[in-house]
Amino acid sequence: MQTISDLKKEISFDDFKAEILNDYRIAVTSRECSLLGRREVLTGKAKFGIFGDGKEVPQLAMAKVFQNGDFRSGYYRDQTFMMAIGEFTIEQFFSGLYANTDLKIEPMSAGRQMGGHFTTHSLDENGNWNDLTIIKNSSSDISPTAGQMPRLLGLAQASKIYRNVKGIDSTKFSIEGNEVAWGTIGNASTSEGLFFETFNAAGVLQVPMVISVWDDEYGISVHAKHQTTKENISEILKGFQRNENEKGYEIFTVNGWDYPALIDTYLRASQIARVEHVPVLIHVKELTQPQGHSTSGSHERYKPVERLNWESEHDCNIKMREWIIANNIATNEELSALENTIKKEVRDGKKASWELFLKPIKKEQKKVVSILNELSQKSSNGAFIKKIQDQLTAIHEPIVKDVLSAARKVLRYVINDDCVEKEQLVNWINSYSKEMQPKFSSHLYSESESSAINISEVKPSYDKDELVDGRIIIRDNFDYIFNKYPEALVFGEDSGNIGDVNQGLEGLQNKYGELRVADTGIREATIIGQGIGMAMRGLRPIAEIQYLDYLLYALPTISDDLATLHYRTKGRQKAPLIIRTRGHRLEGIWHSGSQLGGILNLVRGIHVLVPRNMTKAAGFYNTLLEGDEPALVVECLNGYRLKEKKPSNFGEFKTPIGQVEILKTGNDITLVSYGSTLRLVRQVAKELLEVGIDAEVIDVQSLLPFDINHDIVKSIEKTNRLLIIDEDVPGGASAFVLNEILNTQNAYQFLDSQPKTITAKAHRPAYGTDGDYFSKPSAEDIFETIYDIFHEINPMNFPKLR
């Protein structure tokens, strides 16, 4: 069930008829899946349903011009397209609806995403790249409306890079940059800022991108008059239309029920984008949504009768059917027979998918019932066990939770029992839990041999005692990186011409060109989107966000898309993007850069690295480029002019990820910090020696992952005291660090004093040096807090300070 994508090939009239009927078969199959899928949700077999009914015919047209190597970045209405390119079957549709956790059966996400979220496999089972040039590719969908747009920009820009930058090994990724990135979005979602930001950026960059707007006049229940000026997205975007003198977009409008016009429009759009590298907008109008937005409600509640009647007459499948009959391609009777055949195929596919879902669960259900039956005869609480056994037996269509929950509840009734049957139950619970948990929790991070935590440390070497500004170390290391990795590139606000605001890229644009060291507009979300898309196509982008404070504008894209990509595809897609930014202590509400508590809780799935100086930062970049995972590197904003020894092995030294560094040994208290604040901590540690306190100072270096070797607890076992110093708000990153130390590393058992944290105040830092002093931890704050700990322990030796 796949459409023919070579529209230039000469075919006979019989072949022409067969192709049209095959397209109609795909459209009807997709519609029947939607109709039956809704029923499966309403009967309780599936949790939620959101379908592509009413959008079938334009998706057929898009599929016809979608070539091997192309990428889709769409949303949850595109099931017909996925069927038409041969990447989605009836059985896979229902397996996704039932959340089957077997990736071979449910290849979209192995049940991790709700149905309607599509993907193809860019990686093999070991995390290695497949050849993306010989398959039709779909980047993994996310639910947030317009969230797919920033990634689309990067997928398109990759083709521009591959076409214009020499020396990159494009094997498996591109054939001379001829690939098009195809985006889809609903008309209401074009109201989102991410759409406009992406649309503008693509016009500036001139990348091969085609955006299709599926327009059915509604956004859930809200009409277009509340969504879009003039109720018409292509009308208000006319200013982007290119002309003889100015670059821009090619903009088309077409009715979504007009099969031949759609094919012609998509053919023209494909040629323009593929050959000229010009972005295209296709506004597909007069579409419908026969079942409403989703299974959570009916569209009869909010659409007037006139609209409902219009939709029934202009349904794209009905219009295609009428066109087929009017052009003598098939008769009404022939189409009716085909439709009946398809209905049976969909019903059979649904039944087969449900049986595949149930079979392994029922096998485990049978095991547990047998164990409980034997256990109930041996236990003094047999009656209670028998009741749970009978309840489990009565479930004819169980889910995993039913079986495991019943088994675990029985444990409460056999706490004091000692028998073989109890041991069998415990062994089954442990074994089954161990088997099932990875099905829901694996691949948050890379599990391949190229995982960044597998890369060993290489220390910087020094041929001579030369001290230079920290920015020189960053700059010279990037020089080595761009020379060593032709596929590496960096881009961001002020990153190109002036070499970033702190001169860490000084002179590199002149050396490596404007495509590899590039300036961008002020548009943080799409800077990240560029990086995601290019990383998904084999490039090694470094996306620069000027200050950590500005990362908040990109956080939805990082959290929803980048951080979840490897997880939501169960390891079959990756985007090893490096996000470079700078933060920590400077001055003022929006230039202090310490929002790490919020960031840490939103970006699980990427590494968060907080180097204390530029040598450590450069080492992290070197490590990451040998690995295959995304990361955020937060350089110290006030460290670029501080002197550091200049290494002699640029590009080679590596800072290990997930490992702390002990900067000073001591026996009395463990001080844990990171970033710029460490300079204060180290200064205070020296001052503490004057009053008889010998502190151990530990640099966290890596917040995600955190101290994988548990070196901090080893220190606390020696010192028995802990202080965490952090410039985030109270309960921010310090709470995360404390939780890792106490609950993950179980350090509480070695503490003789209350573990404490020093943080910034709850408000954003005030401007000026005094503002910083009264907003963030000062050296005096740190000294006095530590001294007070020892005063509490031994007031005789440590009299009260104040």
Image (cartoon, helix red, strand yellow):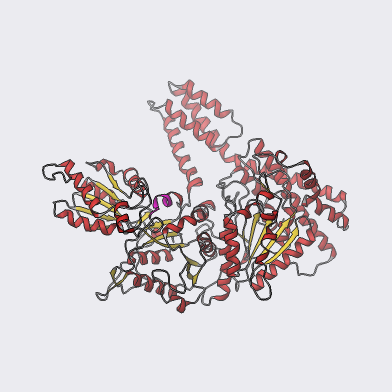
Which residues fall within the magenta stretch? 594-600
Q: Residue furthest left?
A: 796
Q: Is residue 640 above or below residue 718?
A: below
x and y percent of residue 302 in the render? 70, 41
Q: Is residue 67 visible?
A: no
* Front in this rendered view, residue 86 or 142: 142
Q: Is residue 83 left or right of residue 395?
A: right
Q: Residue at x 18, y 57 (%)?
A: 686
Residue 263 picture quarter = bottom right
Q: Determine the residue positioned at 31% across, 59% down.
A: 676
Q: Position of residue 618 (x, y in %)?
A: 36, 67
Magenta region, main secondary structure: helix
- Residue 596 located within the stretch drawn in magenta: yes
Left or right: 566 with respect to 452? right
Q: Is residue 369 magenta?
A: no
Where, quadrant-wise, is the C terminus in this rendering?
A: top left
| For residue 750, side relative to residue 391 (left or right) | left
Can the viewer see residue 497?
yes
The x, y position of residue 746, in whole percent, is 31, 43
Residue 394 in the image, given as x and y percentages of width and height: 59, 28
Q: In the picture, residue 424 is in which quadrant?
A: top left
